[in-house]
Image (cartoon, coloured by chain):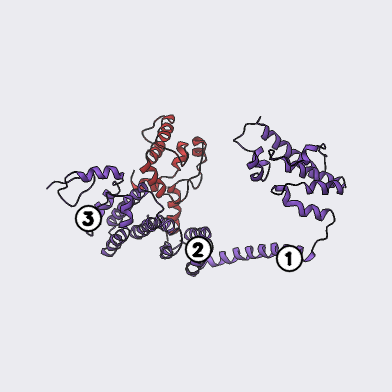
Amino acid sequence: MEKLTGAVVHPAQIADSTHLSDDDALKISARAVLEDFEAVTNGMKRPDSDDESTVDNQSDPMSSWRILINAIAAFYQNDITAMKILVRSFPCNSPAAVLRNVFEILAGKPTNPDAADRFANSLLVRRKELSDGLDLLEEAALYSEQLRNEISRYLPALAQESIEGSKRLYYWAMEHLAEDEPLTELDELSVSVPGAGEASRICALASIRYDPDRALLAWMRSLHSVITERSITSSEATARLMIAGELMESAKRNELLTGEIISSVAASLKSSYTMMETLLPALPPVPTDPEDLYNWLIQAGKADLPVNKLVKQRKRKVKTRELFLFDEVSS
Amino acid sequence: MTLDDILDFPYDPWILLGVTRETDDKAVEAAWKRAGSPKSGILSEAYEMLRDEPSRLRTILLNPRPYARATDAESAMKKHPVYVGPGAWYEAIARRSRP
């Protein structure tokens, strides 16, 4: 209960909670507080005076709200002295304490007119900036190429301030600026943007249908990023490798699998091989032949075995170096 | 299911089966059985997409956005929201990319 007192901001969080039954005492109390609050703020009813409500009861999350209700009632009754006493009894860490300054002003405390003006102006300016910003953004979206370039330049700086902000901007740009071609050029940015693995994955998905070769390269960048970030499990690594194999097959079917792409895929796998091996100990070395590379990706996608099983495997006599976990070859 | 099968699937398989993202194999199987253990149709496909952890991982990785949660699979199917599953998203991307 004490923890709840500091955590609950509004009684509605308890009154509307689906975790409590309707006959729960706390829920009933919260509902009563909401009804009393609505009544007193409409000046319709003055709650019964209750000595208990002026006492900071650490075990009652609603206590500060009851004091607040009585303070509001006292104001409407023009009983400023009683209001001041109640306001002084707001618990320091309670939601009601946020309104202490407001009550002091109601009680006649002089305000700083400059502060009020600055506050009002900041709201107005922010609203203006937001509305101007939206207008500019819509207009800028008409020139998608220029906007993409600007966003590309802006993203690294934004990522330094806010990772989530940079991700949201990146996803917005990918969805709204993909009119003519996929946003894979923004994917080049992904190496410097935190959360690059996720960004590259989305980029790959956006290209799958009509640019499977680009999708494959973006997917490999995504895999490399999440491996480097150490943000995936062995199961996810195998799933990603299998999908890479399927993307490779799709690019091949569409006659888009060039030697350059194959080299890029192999290079990406080799660069992250050491870290991948920690997740998938049974991973064989990366081949460079296209046919072997495809088989490697598919087999690696099935190589998710615990290390202890790997140890048992290693104890068996190995005839050749090309040992696939489910395909032991004897010479 | 093939990669194209997942990309074409228009609905959210979690919504269809009425399971959460944190579900496990048993819960998925139980949901499929509650639905009558269909061997074909969208519920059967949803089950194939979620029946074990590798399948669920694959479905998540090929989906562009987090799935919404829902407990009422029937109401979700009736609603047929514009954007629910990966298929709708890919279709929207394809529409934008067409000349």
Q: Secondary structure at mark 2?
A: helix
Q: Is disc 3 in the same subunit as disc 2?
A: yes
- Say which residue appears at 66% left-offset and 62% top-offset: A127
Q: Which chain is purple?
A: A
Q: Is disc 2 in the same subunit as disc 1?
A: yes
- Above or below, comparing residue A88 to residue A259 in the picture: above
Q: Position of residue A31 (x, y in %)?
A: 70, 36
Q: Chain of mark 3?
A: A
Q: Colour of chain B?
A: red
Q: Secondary structure at mark 3?
A: helix
- Say which residue appears at 48% left-offset and 62% top-offset: A177
Lower position in the chain sequence, tag 3 or tag 2:
2
Q: Position of residue A213 (x, y in %)?
A: 33, 59
Q: CA distance from mark 3 to mark 2?
A: 39 Å
Q: Nearer the viewer, residue A35 or A111?
A: A111
Q: Which mark is residue A159?
A: 2
Q: Position of residue A42 (x, y in %)?
A: 80, 44
Q: Amino acid at mark 2?
A: Ala
Q: Which residue is mark 3?
A: A291
In the figure, is residue A34 to the left or right of A241? right
Q: Which one is closest to the eye, mark 3 or mark 2?
A: 2
Q: Which mark is residue A118?
A: 1
Lower position in the chain sequence, tag 2 or tag 1:
1
